[in-house]
Image: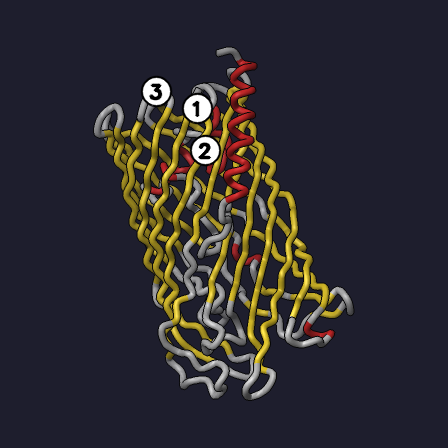
Amino acid sequence: MNKYSDKTKLITIVSAITLISSASSIYAAGFQLKEQSAEGQGNSFAGQTAKAVDASTVFFNPAGMSRLEGNQVQINGSLIVPQAKYEHTSTPSPSALFNKSTGINGGVTALVPAAYAVWKYSEKVNLGISMNVPFGLSTKFDDDWVGAQYNILSEIETINIAPSISYKVNEQLSIGANLQLQKIKGKLTTRRAISATASAKTTLKADDTAFGFGLGLLYEYSDKGRIGFNYRSQIEHTLEGDVTTPALAITALNFNAQADITMPAVASIGIYHEVSNQWALLADLAWTDWSVFDELLIKNNDTQANVPDPTQYNWDDTLFLALGANYKYNDRLELKFGVAFDQGAANDIDRTAGIPDATRYWASVGASYKINQQSTVNVGFSHIRAKSVTVNEDTKSTSYSGTFKPRVNILNVGLNYSF
């Protein structure tokens, strides 16, 4: 097959992947979503910055495209099943409208897609594109739960499309870069008391599109191992939309709105080393610039005034550390294992029910099976447990206090095809 027919085939497959990704649900419980590769899921994404074994390297380190042979396409689907169970510790809310304090779970199950394509342009240059959901959030509570004045629904949906390029400097060093186009949508619904017996829902909806960039480096220190570095920049958004309260025709509760939010920068370093013909050890360390997420300030574009009492977050930067191992059972089957420490960003004072963030601990298993020379199927499963964390909110007419016990199960399945 010549280069031009390969290119035509690649364009056709990329177009199909784009349609599949666009049609899928693009939100999930959590905020930063690491579930971008079924191959990496089994390792808890240890070594993902350095592996560069398939097309998913476009996301984790674009420099890794230089290691790939020929052209490749890949599609993944992650089924994320979270729990965010709430246990009430304060006295019941004095309002008859907001009195449910048991049997509360804000977790929302979702399917998160990821898709990639790589084209070998020349011996030194590879081109690629990724379509991912790097950040997402969805928590949903009952209308009458004790925290309804603060949160019924919190939802952030993002999708990134990143055209990428890699350049092989020499046999050991490769560099890469990409341009990130990010679409974001946000939705926040609360319930406010009108009287002792009546209430009304208020919803903020807004969206924006903005740009960022990524840089990658891969150094192969021997034929047994390599080190990778990847950086994805901040992306600053100014979301525009509206605040609506359908049950109340009040100007102060129905207006054109604006909110600024910055998606954090992420820097990671990883290592992959083959200790024998069967075993490989992997590690990754990532830093996320979550301190940019300090508050949600909503502006009334009709009056040019800020809405009082913005939601405070005051998050801290976080670290993610993952360790893993691969066992090559035979020429077709490779088994994967991994654990990870995922530091929480929220603090006990400002934590909200909308994002009950907590430090998490991962345990993962997975496998890669080579169907033939062109096709490899990947499966990964992770169980994530988090510390119980407190939530206290008291800026409205009612207050509540309790704990959340987050748990997450993730099943990720993917197919990588080379030609």
- Amino acid carrying label 1: it is Arg
Q: Is residue 158 left or right of residue 287?
A: right
Residue depicted at 51% across the width and 11% down the height: 2
Among the two numbered marks 3 and 1 on one chain, the one whose residue lies closer to the N terminus: 1
Q: Amino acid at mark 2?
A: Thr
Q: Earlier in the sequence, mark 3 or mark 2?
A: 2
Q: Nearer the viewer, residue 3 or 268?
A: 3
Task: List x then y, in percent, for residue 185.
Answer: 59, 54
Residue position for label 3: 373
Foreground tag (3 vs 1): 3
**Between 209 and 244, the one nearer to me in the picture:** 244
Q: Give the crowd class for mark 2: few <14, some 14-19, many >=20 residues within 10 Å.
A: many
Q: Categorize mark 1 by other alpha carbons within 10 Å: few (<14), some (14-19), many (20+).
A: some
* Amino acid bearing label 3: Gln
User: Marks 1 and 3: in contact by CB < 8 Å?
Assistant: no
- The numbered disc on residue 67 is 1
Q: Are marks 2 and 1 in contact (CB under 8 Å)?
A: yes
Q: Which residue is mark 2?
A: 57
